[in-house]
Image: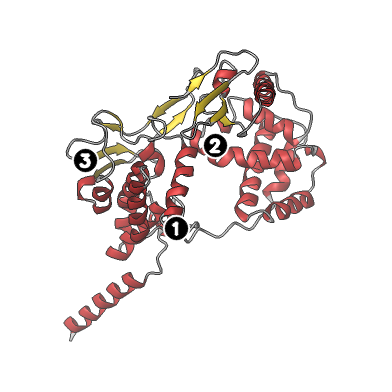
Amino acid sequence: MEKRTLRTDRPGYQYRPNKDGTVAHYWNPRRAVKGSSPSLSTIRLPDGSTDEEIKAECQRLTAQLRDELRQLTAPRTFDGTIKSLIDLYRHDTTSSLHSVKHSTRIRDYEPSLRVLEKSVGKRRIDHLVASDFKRWYADWRKKGHRRASGAIKLLRVVISYGAGERLLGCSTAREILSYMRFEQPAPRTVAMTYDQCLAIVRKSAELKCPSIGFVEAVKFETALRRIDVIGEWAPVPEGGEFRWTGLMSPRDVSKDMILSIKTSKTGAKVARDLGSMPLVVEAMKAYKIPDIGPVVIDEDHGKPYWENRYTEKFRKVRDAAGVPSNVWSMDSRAGAVSETVEATGSLEAARDLATHTTTKTTRRYSRGDGLESSRKIAEARAGNRKKAD
């Protein structure tokens, strides 16, 4: 069990004895500064640190966190730069940033906003011309096509926000951007296979983290999104600690293994018989769904997963299972769609499984080469010809 000290000269300090007799030192932001977000992670201090080094680092990290919290509550002003516009966009509760889901904000919006701040935050908006946007996009693309595409997308969003607020230069910049087109990254072509998912299920049991295998099995068999399986921690409108929402037992998963929920993205009603799904049955040899409470529990913390913690643990299991690193957790959904299309030859069946509104979306998730479905079509056509004879 983790031990703590009451010394006031090392704010946020905690320590834990290791099995070999050494001591692991930590700085806990929630203990260091009252009101810190529970989403902040504890930081392990360097092994072998002296008492003075521990003291200095705890004080440095605490002072840095307090400064960040002060900046969050300070009044925002627009000085004409991209950075100041982003600050306004982040803290104006009427901006679109506050209407998207928390997971979307953390996964898609914030990384791109940080790219904009770091690379072009000092630029004045009323001085921008088309060549600036072209040059920025080229520079961002050197570090990844998706990074460049995401940065341009958020730049459009933020400048449109500024134009709506009638901030200097934003309307002209938005008009310039509206005539510009940037090459989009190629759609993802990787889909997790049944064998890869099975390897992850078995390796997660071996590594004593069977929740990973259970989640991936459910996603692969049902085509549900990860957030619909592990749930989500998000801030509440009135402030305070983050709250979790997600699959609960027995409300959403009955004793006879019927899963019934509304999906988070479209609100579609979904019912799935988990007991009829081989990968889920295999995963449940090692993972037991709690009789009551959240269905998926992070073994390391005894509570539902935070998104980043799930991703980190998934990567460790995937690598240990020998699954290629270009296979991501999100690819199990694509695997479900691809396998369904190959097995049935029907985009409509895959659409219904994935709860897509159109088969156009389903087609993007179907990443097989169409070989099996083309064989079935050829067999059907040959059969019709024989009947005609």
Q: Residues within 10 Å of mark 1 (few under 14, many from 20)?
A: some
Left/right of residue 178 with respect to residue 36 in the rendered view: right
Above or below, comparing residue 311 to residue 40 in the picture: below
| For discs 3 and 1, the disc positioned in front in the rendered view | 3
Q: Position of residue 359 (x, y in %)?
A: 38, 56
Q: Secondary structure at mark 1?
A: helix
CA gap between label 2 and label 1 equals 24 Å
For disc 2, the marked residue is 106
Three-letter amino acid code at disc 3? Ile
Residue drawn at the location 60% of the way across and 13% of the way down: 7
**Name of the residue lying farthest toward the right:** 127
Three-letter amino acid code at disc 2? Ile
Q: In this rendering, does residue 237 appear at all?
A: no
**Name of the residue lying farthest toward the bottom:** 389
Check if mark 3's residue and mark 1's residue have beta carbons within 8 Å.
no
For disc 1, the marked residue is 364
For disc 3, the marked residue is 258
Q: In this rendering, does residue 95 appear at all?
A: yes
* Coloring scheme used: secondary structure
Which residue is at the front of the view, 244 or 201?
201
Residue drawn at the location 54% of the way across and 40% of the way down: 107
Mark 2 or mark 1, which has the lower sequence index?
2
Mark 3 or mark 1, which has the lower sequence index?
3
CA gap between label 3 and label 2 equals 31 Å
Three-letter amino acid code at disc 1? Arg
CA gap between label 3 and label 1 equals 29 Å
